[in-house]
Amino acid sequence: MKNRTAIGAVLSALMALGAAGVWKLQTKIDGQRESLHLESEDLMMRSGSMVKRMSLEYAPLMAAIYWTRAVQYFGEKHFLHDQNLELLWPLLDISTTLDPQLLPAYRAGSIFLSDAPPRGAGQPDLAVKLLERGIKANPEQWRLYQDLGNVYYFDKKDYTKAAEAFATGGNFPGAMIWMKVMAAKIATEGESLETSFFLWKQVYEAATEKQTKDNAELHLRLIQAQFDCREIDKVADTFESQNGRRASGMIELVQAGMLKGLPADSRGYAYVLGEDGKAKLNPKSPLAEKWESIKK
Amino acid sequence: MKNVLTVAANTFREAVRDRVLYNLVFFALLMMAAAILVGQISIGIEKSVIISLGLTAISVIGLFIAVFIGVGLVSKEMDKRTLYALLAKPLERWEFLLGKYFGLLMTLTVNTAAMALGLYAALLTVAQPLEKADGYVLVAVYLILLKLALIVALALLFSCFTTPFLAILFTAGIYVAGVFAGDLRVVKSVAMDAATMDSGTLKLLRVISYVLPNFENFNVMGAVAHGRSVPASLVGSSTLYAAVYGATVLILAAMVFSKRNLK
Amino acid sequence: MEHWGVVCVDAGGRVLKNRGMAKPAIEIENLTKEYPYGFLNLKKRLSLEGLTLQVETGEVFGFLGPNGAGKSTTIKCLMRLIFPTKGTARILGRSIDDVGMHREIGYLPEQPYFYDYLTAAEVLDYFARFHGLTANDRRERVQKMLKKVGLESAKKIQLRKYSKGMLQRVGLAQAILHEPKVVVLDEPMSGLDPLGRREVRDIILELKRDGRTVLFSMHILPDAEMLCDRVGVIVGGKLRGVGAPEELVGIQAQGMEILFELGADEKKPTLLARATRTGERYRVQLKEEELYAAIEELKQAGARILSVTQIKATLEEFFMGLVEADRAQAAAVEVNGK
């Protein structure tokens, strides 16, 4: 009997060794696979209709799976700071072909697609295509018109079409009043900070998941910064007209009594005056690097 | 060791006579159909489709054999009372178990090799002559075989302590979970609500992702279908992974089986 | 070559319980087996309770008992197929944990089906490989065994086409192919027609002549009476009696029985009143001392006497008595409430 417990102990030790070995090997394999881009980076089938046929009765389930893959794909790329988002469109295409009523795919998907890199795929045309398909399949969803208007306004800078979208959407029962208001404003003014701020605010308030909300929040902060800088520039212009030269720094404006203390951005970093004498974000602010990406 | 080989040889013979290998006919027909049709309906991707389809079929058919027959390895011998007669011989329980394992592994190897031949035959009909890159397909087949070896070990383990039906369920479940195991390691960044998951859950997910068999390790279909090579170091690591993981599972199976009261 | 000592037999060829010269072939001590059952396996059922017995070398020992009494359980414990909760056992002086000891034992499991797609010759060859025989040896012995159990003509047919009886014979063959010292058979007569049973009986007797020890479990009591040197009766997981069959049931004859037909002139003897009639024949039971008077009377009446036999208690009656007693006890226990 003593023999048995001895053997049992040896075997258990071997198993523990095995488990440790497995852990170590897995890490090694992960590294080897990654450096060779061997992850299932490819979609075997890019044809939405083929996938639909192969899904038999389970198309909506498959749609959910593909949509989830799209979300994971997008998030992973983000995490890895990888700007190559070529599979995003196919994944969204397939998801919405499998289930044309999959609203989150249209809504969040259009943002992922249209946003400029590095945050998004920078493909606003595809975003428009996606949304038009969504509108066709879900004609009563006025929010899709909101998304469409956003894409035209922010990424395609096509203010006529943007206004159109907002106007059409605004006509729906249950649509919010501001849609029509925005339609008019954009038709006349085109792009403006107030409009931009307002539109992003709508997105922020209506967003239910974190990624969309965070993204909208970022935009709002940046637009806020633009507002602030605009106001500071007005003060700096006054200073210039009074003193014949641009102020050398914020301190001067404060000392001149034109500012009640150092104005700071929403992250708490004080604005600075650039070489051209215009206000801009403090380079140390986390918003500064995002600024560059927004500015394309 | 001789006993292990004896049991293995008999297991192989049984599988052959039980017409398990007839699935090869189905596979051959599938490959022929694919080779004929693909050429008609698409341009330029015949090769990659045949390779992808062939590898998928090899993987899926192999999976079915590994799970269903793997689970039956022990239970069938119990029902037929052959196990009872065998254990009355100078044969250790672990020798029996290992013998059954290697017997099925042999069957799978023969089956897979035959299918690989069929795959190459189909390739030849759509693209001659074969290029060097087509040799990489063999690497993919080898890795699939490694995966199957691991699955058989798991099926054997489960069949040692539950009913065949449950064992099939568990094995299939672990297979599906194992395919996504790698993703669990990236969850930290990717979940929509990643920040709302506490670090305890994240750590747990991470541990689970290592404990589960990572079947993605053996998938190089994407590379091979487009003629890209697979480095030897990866093949080596994957072989080691399958060997170590498989051995651990088999040791556990042997320990469980040696304590089991046979009904 | 271990020397198992001298085995003593009586005039009738039956092995006598050893006088301490030969070691017992099988020793079982306090074997107990619990089976958990019920919700969460909390309740326990005792399928074997404190079984202690010995099988002497060279003896044919029969295990008798109703279904579920624990015969199979005992045998499976011996073969290490199930693990006893308590108690130990030794075969040929070695612990049952010793797998090497299995070289010397042969086992026929209950209701074997074996491998569907193998032929009898292949199955026997396969099983024989574990005994380390050379290929020639194996071939020879497989042929011999097939002949012995009467399967020679069917040796190339796959087992899935075999009848139950044929499978039983394959099982028997694999149990004795390697000429083991101890042979354990679980229900060896199961599924056999009378001819088959006769053949198995002959094989068992042959094994005994070769000096091998045979332990088997059985339902068919008359066969047991005929074959066994000793029997052990198990009812309800407990050993109720061990000994030579006639020891268990008592040697005394309980009386005599005369079978007769009436004579041509139909004279009626007074015995007729006590006789039972079946067609033309009459059966009457009497005490031994009345025998000769009765025969004389029948002779006077011109009756034709067909047979005179002893009435002995059979193993079956002894057996039934035990079963009834056990049931009564169990019932009593229930009434009193655990």
Image (cartoon, helix red, strand yellow):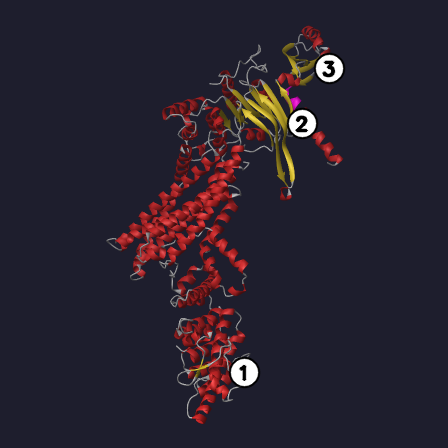
State the mark number for residue A203. none
Residue shown at the point (53%, 74%) measured from the top left: A206
Instruction: Name the residue beneath numbered marker 1.
Output: A177
Separation of disc 2 and disc 3 at Cα? 34 Å
Q: Nearer the viewer, mark 1 or mark 3?
A: 1
Question: Are the residues under badges 2 and 1 in a single subunit?
Answer: no
Between residue B65 and residue B214, name the one nearer to us: B214
Q: Position of residue B64 (x, y in %)?
A: 43, 48
Query: Which region of the structure is painted magenta?
Result: C314-319
Q: Is residue B17 above or below residue C127?
A: below
Residue shown at the point (32%, 50%) measured from the top left: B138
For the N terminus of chain A, which image quadrant?
top right
Disc 2 residue type (three-letter): Val
Instruction: Name the residue beneath numbered marker 2.
Output: C323
Horizontal arrangement in the rendering, residue C294 relative to residue B145 (left or right): right
Instruction: Name the residue beneath numbered marker 3.
Output: C273
Horizontal arrangement in the rendering, residue B47 relative to residue C243 (left or right): left
Question: Are the residues under badges 2 and 3 in a single subunit?
Answer: yes
Label 1 element class: helix
Q: Is residue C315 magenta?
A: yes
Between residue A140 and residue C269, name the one nearer to us: A140
Q: Chain of mark 2?
A: C
Residue C123 occupies quadrant? top left
